[in-house]
Image: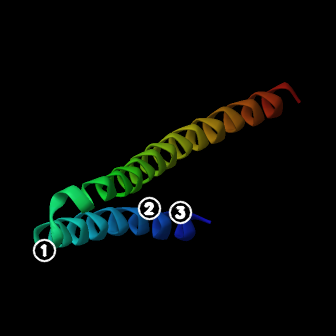
Amino acid sequence: MNAYNKIMLYFWLAAAILIFLVVTVMGFKDGFEVWAYYYGLAAIATMAYLSRRWMMKRFERNHEEFYKRNEAVEENSEDQK
């Protein structure tokens, strides 16, 4: 699952960059009044990248804390026996 999350993280980053570049090029070719609205798609892809990165870091931090607490509980239960 970790590989999938990393792939999707970089997918959203690549999508944001690609959309931004394509919209900019097409804006110069056809005029920005036509293509300016598509910068919203780049913004959405950037927000998806940032939220996925934030959630991955949050999950890793909580996962480590869970294992530390679980080890402490197991040590306490072994000491009581």
Q: Nearer the viewer, residue 56 or 14?
A: 14
Which amino acid, by three-letter code, is at mark 3? Asn
Task: Measuring from the top left, give residue 77's x and y in whole percent.
Answer: 82, 30
Please identify the quarter of the rendering in which residue 74 is found: top right
Q: Secondary structure at mark 2?
A: helix
Which amino acid, by three-letter code, is at mark 1? Lys
Q: Which numbered dot is residue 9?
A: 2
Q: Nearer the viewer, residue 31 or 52?
A: 31
**Separation of disc 1 and disc 2 at Cα?**
31 Å
Q: Check the image and report above or below for 67 versus 24.
A: above
Task: Measuring from the top left, give residue 25's x and y in whole percent.
Answer: 15, 72
Q: Residue at x 17, y 71 (%)?
A: 30
Report which residue position mark 3 lands on. 5
Report which residue position mark 1 lands on. 29
**Separation of disc 3 and disc 2 at Cα?**
6 Å
Is tag 3's residue or tag 1's residue first in the polypeptide sequence? Answer: 3
Q: Residue at x 61, y 37 (%)?
A: 68
